[in-house]
Image (tube, rainbow, N blue to C red):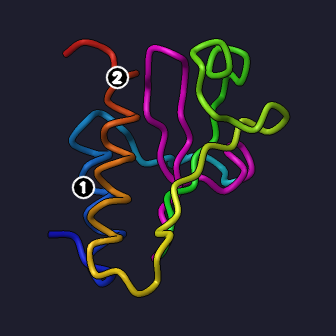
Amino acid sequence: MTTRATFKQDVESYLLTVGARRWTGPAADLLGYEFVLPTTLGELWVIVYDDMIACRWGNVKKALAAGLCVNPYTGKWNFHIATQHCQNAPTATLAIFQAEASSFLPPA
């Protein structure tokens, strides 16, 4: 079970397992995002905080065409731990992100 204490580590482990790579170039190139996840819709840039998974699609038009609820101007696609008092909220947030992201992962 993912807890608030392990949320960031658990999300980062998942990202690396599904093919994301840590960004090693200049931070400005990815607007501060730390991971690049290749998907069938183009690159998904990700940074993980203690209480959210912040994402931005590199190709906003493809993400919108796929029916994702994405900010049409910035490509932001974020996942917040919504309920402060719910013990399972970190687990649920990670599970929702995994389910959504897995739909766009390239075949292994």
> Who's the residue at 74% across and 51% down the image?
28
- CA gap between label 1 and label 2 equals 16 Å
Residue 42: say if magenta: yes
Q: Quadrant of the C terminus?
A: top left
Question: Start and end of the magenta stretch?
Answer: 28-50
Q: Which mark is residue 13?
A: 1
**Residue flagged by tag 1: what amino acid is it?**
Ser
- The residue at which mark 2 appears reads as 105
Q: Residue at coordinates 44% horizontally, 22% vertically from top-left?
A: 39
Q: Residue at x 40, y 87 (%)?
A: 85
Q: Helix, strand or loop at disc 2? A: loop
Crowding at dot 2, Cα within 10 Å, few <14 / some 14-19 / many 20+, comes out as some
Horizontal and vertical percent for residue 61?
A: 73, 16
Q: In the picture provided, is 87 more to the left or to the right than 37?
A: left
Disc 2 marks which amino acid?
Leu
Label 1: which secondary element: helix
- 93 over 74 or under it: above or below: below
> Percent x, y for residue 54?
57, 55
Closer to the camera, 39 or 36? Answer: 39
Mark seen at residue 88: none
The answer to whether residue 25 is above or below residue 3 is above
